[in-house]
Image (spheres, rainbow, N blue to C red):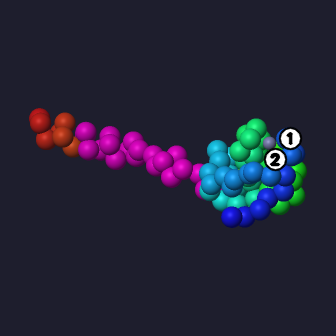
Amino acid sequence: MAHYQPCPNCASEQAEAIGFTWWGGMVGPKMFTHVKCTKCGTTYNGKTGKSNQQAIAIYVTLWTIFGIVVMTFFPSRNSNRQNNPSTAANQSNISTTARY
Ligand SMILES: [Zn+2]
């Protein structure tokens, strides 16, 4: 079992690694050695013994910027899809002409 730094809140050394978080999915917690104190529930960096709040904030911000960049340079293809009004008008004219 991996040994982590003591909890910054209650100094307990009983901490367990977190496999999944809302902010980092499955990769984020591993990147920051994100662990949870089994005594008080505080989450922190098991390698440094300090809070991961700042790292999480930076991580989320970077992903937000990344998302905006992707949305800007790769817009949805649906926005480029347009109906061709001239083609639709021609088809209705043909059917109208054929009827008379
Ligand atoms: Zn604790």
Q: Main secondary structure of the magenta part?
A: helix
Q: Is residue 66 above or below residue 90?
A: below
Magenta segment includes 10: no
Tell me the element at label 1. loop
- Give percent across and percent down for residue 47: 83, 60
Magenta segment includes 85: yes
Magenta segment, which residues?
65-93
- Please say whether residue 61 is visible from this viewpoint: no
Question: Is the residue indicated by label 2 positioned so its CB lies within 8 Å of ligand 1?
Answer: yes
The amino acid beneath tag 2 is Ser
- Could you say which is closer to the camera, residue 91 or residue 64? 64
Image point (40%, 46%), residue name: 84
Categorize mark 2 by other alpha carbons within 10 Å: few (<14), some (14-19), many (20+): some
- Could you say which is closer to the camera, residue 11 or residue 75? 11
Image point (45%, 46%), residue name: 82
- Could you say which is closer to the camera, residue 61 or residue 48? 48
Give the image quadrant in which the ligand numbered 1 is located: top right
- Give percent across and percent down for residue 32: 77, 58
Q: Is residue 69 left or right of residue 57?
A: left
Between the residue at mark 1 and the residue at mark 2, the CA separation in whole angstroms equals 8 Å
The amino acid beneath tag 1 is Asn
Which quadrant does the N terminus fall into? bottom right
Question: Is the residue indicated by label 1 positioned so its CB lies within 8 Å of ligand 1?
Answer: yes
Categorize mark 1 by other alpha carbons within 10 Å: few (<14), some (14-19), many (20+): some
Q: Which residue is mark 2?
A: 12
Q: Which residue is mark 1?
A: 9
- Give percent across and percent down for residue 45: 81, 54
- Could you say which is closer to the camera, residue 87 or residue 75? 75
